Amino acid sequence: MASSTSRRPQREEEKKSPPIHSFSAGLLEVSIWENQIDTDDGQKTAFAVSFQRSYKDGNNWKKTSALRPTDCLVLAHLLNLAFAWINEKPQEE
């Protein structure tokens, strides 16, 4: 079963903003990032989605974007959840 997390907005003095939402299943995690971009019509919100798989190297946990064949359908499910979450957000006029 996939899990979902929302994270609090970060303060401006903090260097790196966390993703605004993430979904995970097993060792896979999909993160949703929100960016404000300037357009001819003013500032708009743009979303980006990234994924990573955790793995253990000795005693250390690391992250990679390389997938095993068995990860593909799980990732597809997590990406579907991310797509639905983004599209449920109110659209800007």
Image: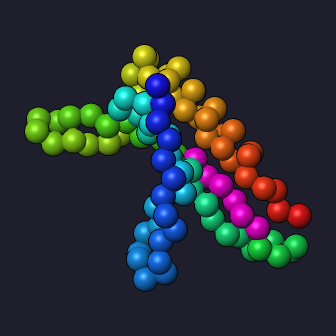
Q: Going by the image, does 82 lie left or right of 41?
A: left
Scheme of image coloration: rainbow
Range of residues picked out in magenta = 44-49
Residue ranking furthest to the top: 70
Provide residue 50's location: percent of width, then percent of height.
52, 46
Q: Is residue 55 visible?
A: yes
Q: Is residue 65 visible?
A: no
Q: Nearer the viewer, residue 2 or 45?
A: 2
* The C terminus: image quadrant: bottom right
Provide residue 71's location: percent of width, then percent of height.
44, 23
Residue ranking furthest to the left: 59
Q: Going by the image, does 85 lie left or right of 28?
A: right
Answer above or below: position of 9 versus 52.
below
Q: Going by the image, does 31 lie left or right of 90?
A: left
Q: Nearer the viewer, residue 2 or 49?
A: 2
Q: Going by the image, does 50 lie left or right of 13?
A: right
Whether residue 46 is in magenta: the answer is yes
What residue appears at the point 48 percent right and 30 percent down from the top-left corner?
2
Could you tell me what secondary structure mostly forms the magenta stretch?
strand
Q: Quadrant of residue 65?
A: top left
Answer above or below: position of 18 versus 13.
above
Provide residue 61's location: percent of width, then percent of height.
21, 41
What residue appears at the point 43 percent right and 83 percent down from the top-left corner?
13
What residue appears at the point 48 percent right and 47 percent down from the top-left corner?
5
Whether residue 48 is in magenta: the answer is yes
Q: How many marks?
A: 0
What residue appears at the point 32 percent right and 37 percent down from the top-left corner?
54
